[in-house]
Amino acid sequence: MINQQSESLINSHLEQNINQGYKFGWFDWFCLWYPPGWLILFNRHWQHYHQDPDGWNWLEYILFLIPCGFYLAFLSRWLRLGCRSPRTEVEEFNPNYQQAFRTEILAPIVQYYFRGELQQLENLPSTGPMIVAMNHAGMSFPWDFISLGYLLGQTRGWIAQPIAEGSLFEHPWMVWWLPPKWSQVLGAVRAELSNFEAAVAQGKILLYAPEGIRGPRKGWRQRYQLQKFDLSFLQLSDRYHIPILPVVCIGSESLHPWTINLKKIQKIFKLPFLPISPLMFALVLFPSMGVWAMRTRLHYFVEPMETEFGTLSQERKIVYQRAKRFQAQLQVRVNELLSKSVIVSRRGAKTQSK
């Protein structure tokens, strides 16, 4: 009874504030411009729409902006909460909040910072359900997928939900960095077969990385070299007759360039990856920059829909061969688009020199 009352209070608070909207002040614009401020912006937006007594406060936000101040902010919050972790009781996926976050926070980041563009829109269907399969890279916060979700929402009005690695849900760093169950509320589906199948069975539009975490983990040396594809998306596509929409992203490797993954230390801390790069010095001074990424151009090329389905009785070996062919086709397309971008950039350089 108490849980139902608290849930209804949270929902009424959310609906009331969604009608009012989140208005940017000078401090928000400053946070958008200043890399350590992005984490502040995410949390302040959440606190506008949700009751979050365990969240960060103003003093701690100010400390975020000072070199090594995040560590003092963390200590302050930990002591304020009575030496415990933040509570995580909150509602699940909320499309209303996803829409508010998309239009009020993601819009300026995707449009003006990452300069995201959807191309080959003639291949984009009018409605779902479908599995949107894309190459995943960057060894950073998953901005390639977040930006794609925003662009699909703007172009078609879709509510697209990403299949996300487990660390985005419950890793201790994420629990302290971001609001409780922030990923679930924004629509992320845990990358486990049971959750993936349930979402497919419900006919949702899902954003999926066939490479899994191997994509961003591969590092800068292997940029734009697609890693081994999982089989689950093909098997679920066959089982529920859900088409697959391939999308190629060019620019995602530059979200965190010049990286090397420290595999042994990564496993100790149970992280999806642990990058080492020239940017890591800044991250040590400003840990709140963990949700930030380098400015780049994210170009998304929508490929023709895959509507041919295999039979459920297919052997795993045959499904594996299909996954290999699908990977090879996407790799060829990635190479073609990279060659074109190099030619265009050279022509632009020659024009400027003249």
Image: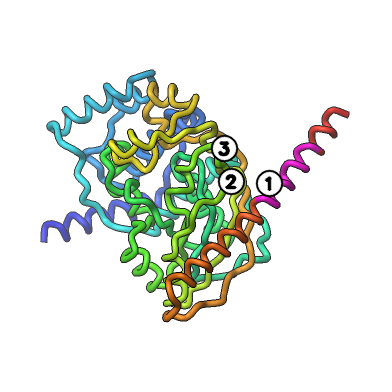
Percent across and percent down for residue 308 are 56, 76
Location of the C terminus (image quadrant): top right
Residue located beneath label 3 in the image: 254
Q: In which quarter of the view is residue 67 placed?
A: top left
**Residue denoted by label 1:** 338
Name the residue at 60% across, 45% down. 298
Q: Which residue is mark 2?
A: 224
Say which mark, if any, is on residue 325.
none
Crowdedness near tag 3: few (<14), some (14–19) or many (≥20) residues, C-alpha within 10 Å: many
| Tag 1–tag 2 contact (CB < 8 Å) | yes
**Which is more N-terminal, label 2 or label 1?**
2
- CA distance for labels 2 and 3: 10 Å
At label 1, counting other C-alpha atoms closer than 10 Å, the crowd grade (few under 14, some 14-19, many 20 or more) is: some
Q: Amino acid at mark 3?
A: Ser
Please tell me which residue is depicted at 53% across the width and 46% down the height of the picture: 107
Residue numbers of the magenta segment: 335-346
Q: Amino acid at mark 2?
A: Tyr
Quadrant containing the N terminus in the rendered view: bottom left
Amino acid residing under circle 1? Leu
Q: Residue 28: x and y, percent?
A: 45, 33
Alpha carbons under labels 1 and 2: distance apart: 9 Å
